[in-house]
Amino acid sequence: MACTKEELKQRIEATPVNSNGRAMYSPELQRDAVEYSRAQQVATGGSVGAIATELGLNGWTLQRWHQNERRAQRSGASFVEVTPKKRGRPPKVGSAVVTSAAAFEVTCPNGFEVRVPARFEVRALRDLLAAVEGR
């Protein structure tokens, strides 16, 4: 998604902050900022640090996003976003539904649904579910 500087600045300013005061930038925002940064580097020759300052980011933050993207491209890995969503009514305790061979969905006792790819690591899923359930 090609974003303008102003759109990115607004999204960055609207980013939620966790209890430790750290901004919780979405993967989409990170990808858009890296894409914008690359385009600006080609167009103006500006540094990542200067572009980050224009956007209202710390230079190290944007630099790390560039580095993470390069690493992912080298390894052939792709980021898979896992987003829990709250269901309207409480589900049966401990229910799980296989939605396809490529992904599965877990419904937590507290009403959150989590859909993950089938190859999602078991340990990571256990930690994710514990966080979603507030344990």
Image (cartoon, rainbow, N blue to C red):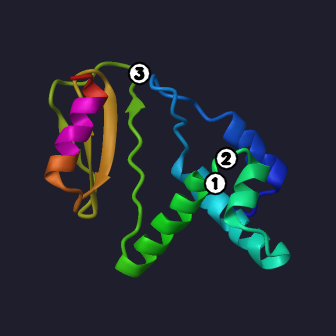
Which callout, 3 or 1, points to the residue nearer the camera? 1
Q: Amino acid at mark 1?
A: Gly
Q: Secondary structure at mark 1?
A: helix
| Residue situated in front as seen by the camera: 84 or 131 | 131
| Label at residue 88 | 3
Counting other residues with Cα less than 10 Å from the Cα at mark 2, is it few (<14), some (14-19), or many (20 or more)? some
- Earlier in the chain: of badge 3 and badge 1, it is 1
Residue receiving disc 2: 57
Measuring from the top left, give residue 101's x and y in whole percent.
23, 63
How many marks the image carries: the answer is 3
Q: Secondary structure at mark 2?
A: loop
Q: Quadrant of the C terminus?
A: top left
Q: Is residue 100 left or right of residue 49?
A: left
Which callout, 1 or 2, points to the residue nearer the camera? 1
Q: Quadrant of the N terminus?
A: bottom right
- At 45% from the left edge and 77% from the top edge, which residue is drawn? 73
Q: Is residue 61 left or right of residue 83?
A: right
Q: Amino acid at mark 3?
A: Gly
- Earlier in the chain: of badge 2 and badge 3, it is 2
Which callout, 2 or 3, points to the residue nearer the camera? 2
Q: Which residues are magenta?
A: 125-131
- At 33% from the left edge and 35% from the top edge, which residue is drawn? 113
**Cβ–Cβ under 8 Å for marks 3 and 1:** no
Counting other residues with Cα less than 10 Å from the Cα at mark 1, is it few (<14), some (14-19), or many (20 or more)? some
Measuring from the top left, give residue 63's x and y in whole percent.
57, 61
Q: Amino acid at mark 2?
A: Leu
**Cβ–Cβ under 8 Å for marks 1 and 2:** yes
Look at the picture and state if 1 lies above or below 73. Answer: above
